Image (cartoon, grey):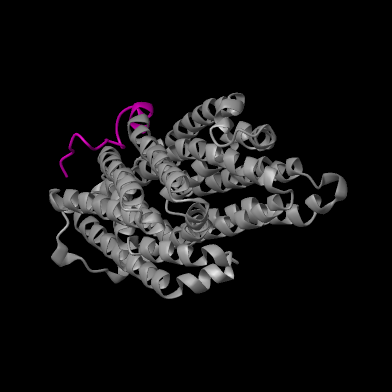
Amino acid sequence: MQQTRSEIDMCRGPLLPSILMFALPLMASSVLQLLFNAADVIIVGRFAGENSLAAVGSNTSLINLMTNLFLGLATGTNVLAAQLIGAGKHGRLKMTIHTSISLGIISGLLLTIVGLLFATQILELMQTPAEILGLSALYLRVYFLGMPAMMVYNFGSAILRAKGDTKRPLYFLLAAGVINVILNLIFVIIFHLDVLGVALATVISQFISAGLILRTLMREKGAFKVSLRRLKPNGATVKRILRIGIPAGIQGVVFSLSNVVIQSSINSFGATVMAGNAAAANLEGFVWVAMNAFNQAALTFTGQNVGAGKYSRINKIALTAESCEVAVGLVCGIGVFLLYEPLLGIYSDSQPVIDAGYVRLQYICATYFLCGLMDCIVGSIRGMGASITPTVVSLLGSCVLRLVWVATIFQIPQFHSPEILYLSYPVSWIITFAAHLVFYIMLRRKFPAHDAIPAESRAI
């Protein structure tokens, strides 16, 4: 396959410049997505009223919970495609790409059906207040009409990432995000469509981004060229994608569930602590997506080099990605912590709320690089083709440990405080990272110390 200007050679040359070229556009994409989401909330909050804002906000955790499982499949696509690119298996790569896009469409349609049929029942189970139940259900049903487009965009982006192209998904996201904000303003302010307008703007922007991704893949050459007539899942390829993708998706789902339990504990301290926690968590989101770009880099670079038989580069990739992640995590995390007052002031002008947010930042944001270390080593492990073990380790270390912490230490009267609750995060990150590192060393020993030549003689 001839390399284009949008792609990165991951199997040759210095790693640091290539990893930065890969990660920086991905980082920008994630930050932009957060900014566009924030713009949605600001517009509906300022121009549609408190009930509309509550209706949109009440769906966030549910949407994340329902989509995480299917988005995990995109991780499977990324790893498998990267390994096939490195191995030069063009025929199987083409089949993988068409299967992945098909999976995106099918999973999106399944989510749409669930959202349309069961929106009200699901929201009732979540004890959504009666005064916003109608608005929440309307938003959820319309939002899930865009799920096929969201899934196609994510699977298409995973395919492009597998060959090192993170720039074009950034451009597509930027275009769709700007259109989303403009449509929000038109639908909500001019046409007074309220929650319906916000949901419609989101769905339209999702189809635009998906259309741009599909158009790009249909105009590619060689194995990356997508033909709509060939869009059907291949059984063997689906199994390979699911082997990596399902554990990653389950991990995301369980993380969401554990965060619900943590949130319920936060709620016990009242509205001020809840507001400060929410504002601080929002700021931490920007730090996390910045670090997560290097997790994706470790996954993709490792996958390509394993496929190409460049085993001598595996440890170098892990060390380079981890070093970049620590640098970004320290600079961004401590930066947010030091500038807590003006940053938290964006969300609230209440000093008690700002003080409550500062407590969370002190324990979590200042140590957030530890979370990045944990995630980044998982990227390297999944790039080598292992997915179940890191998922189990992550669930035990980061989810179960926190739940046990809440049920035991947090229940002791002298330890029943937000500080002790927040302390569970860095403790779980350290323990989980140590366990992942041990598994990484064991897994790495299964690969040869020296490169395998030629790559074309091997099958994946």
| Image point (85%, 51%), residue name | 412
Left or right relative to 63: residue 240: left
Q: Determine if the magenta segment contains residue 344.
A: no
Q: Is residue 208 left or right of residue 319?
A: left
Q: Quadrant of residue 352?
A: top right
**Percent position (x, y) of residue 432?**
62, 46
Dividing the image into 4 quarters, which one contains the C terminus?
bottom left
Q: Residue 440 in the image: state x and y as whole percent.
A: 53, 45
Up the image or down, 114 lies above or below 432; here it is: below
Q: Name the residue nearer the viewer: 138 or 226.
A: 138
Q: Is residue 207 left or right of residue 421?
A: left
How many labels were placed on the picture? 0
The x, y position of residue 398, in whole percent, is 62, 50
The vertical placement of 7 against 197, above or below, is above
What main secondary structure does the magenta stretch of the protein show?
loop
- Residue 269, given in percent of the width and then of the height, sits at 74, 48
Q: Which residues are magenta?
A: 1-19
